[in-house]
Amino acid sequence: MERPNSMVSFFPVLMPDEHLFSIFARYHQIAGNATIDRTKAQLGLAAGPLKPQDVSNQTFHTALKTAATLLMQSLSKVARDHTLVPLLKLSLPSRIQDQLHTAWENDQSSIPAPNTLMNDRMLTFDKSWRFCNECIKTDTREVGFGYWHLSHQIPSIKRCKIHQAPLLSSGLKTLNDFQLPRDAHENTVQGSDNLMENRWECWLMELFASCQASGSWVGLEVLKATFENVWGVPKKPGWARTRRYEEIVGYVEDVAGIPLLETIFEFYQGDRLTYRGRARPNFIRATFESTDPKIRHPIYYLLPIWAAGLSPHPVEWSRGL
């Protein structure tokens, strides 16, 4: 592979569980460039935010291509091991997944366009860069520096899977200045005191690890079919299906608990039965009955699947269909 810029004479190695954008922050600090723009120009990075959970903007597109080229690894390997793609692609229709997979197999960094995604303003989990103080201590002791861990950026996760310590919010929505955890302002995010939150977090972290390990391309069609199968949703539209959606959302609320749901959805905050003067929306029905072609965040689909007691291994879901 050719390097994106001949002026890049070295590039760091990605560490275990390191987020893709973290390596660019480390490169900037090692290179000693006078400006951020100088580093971005060297690496061929497009202008734009470096958000921990965003895999659809042009900056991510160029960062993935640059890292794969400089590290002489395939795009799919870098995306699988160092980005949230294994989780976020679960809600992509098979057509888009096929396009993505084909592009990556041909060394082309293809991603869903931002205008194809549904706005995530209803999702209230922390979207800033997060870190674990114990991980920073361990990383510094073992490799000489701290870095941004991928597993700390999984949506709605509030504890470190290794140390079970509360994750801290850096307050940074983007790494536009290529900050590392040691540069971040520490704003403590509350840990998971609720048993259901811990169960959900453990399940979601295991699901993410399973998606990384299997490299499977389970997508939206499997998620929908799995939901309908496990919950016994009537096939035909009508009163029976509407009533079933009401029963399911009630069961999910009982299993998850309002304290967990209000950390994920805006319309559950404050334990209200209403939202903006109307009855609280049934997110189950809205998710699975929607005709909006825009791509929803996978957490909408995963919560009811988790509440039904399914395993956190998506490849197993399709076997029962």
Image (cartoon, rainbow, N blue to C red):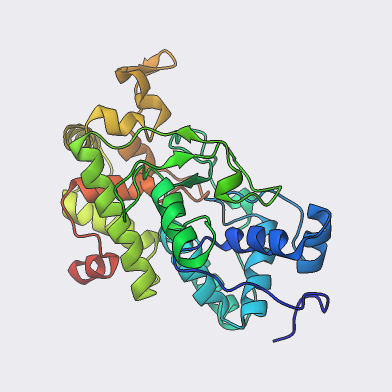
Front in this rendered view, residue 139 or 309: 139
Residue at image coords 45%, 61%? 141
Q: Quadrant of the C terminus?
A: bottom left
Residue at image coords 23%, 52%? 228
User: Which quadrant of the figure has residue 45?
Assistant: bottom right
Front in this rendered view, residue 295 or 32: 32
Say if residue 235 shows up in the picture: no
Task: Tell me where residue 72 appears, x and y as whole percent.
Answer: 62, 83
Task: Tell me where residue 166 appears, x and y as whole percent.
Answer: 35, 41
Say if residue 225 shows up in the picture: yes
Q: Is residue 256 above or below residue 205?
A: above
Instruction: Give the left or right position of residue 8, taking residue 310 as reference.
Output: right
User: Which quadrant of the figure has residue 216?
Assistant: bottom left
**Count of numbered labels shown in the rendering:** 0
Residue at image coords 18%, 56%? 310
Residue at image coords 27%, 28%? 259
Name the outermost residue toward the bottom.
1
Front in this rendered view, residue 31 or 103: 31
Instruction: Give the left or right position of residue 21, taking residue 141 as reference.
Output: right
Task: Tell me where residue 205 appears, x and y as whole percent.
Answer: 32, 56
Front in this rendered view, residue 165 or 106: 165
Q: Quadrant of the N terminus?
A: bottom right
Q: Is residue 228 above or below residue 80?
A: above
Name the outermost residue toward the front.
141
Task: Tell me where residue 81 appears, x and y as whole percent.
Answer: 46, 69
Instruction: Give the left or right position of residue 275, taking residue 48 as reference.
Output: left
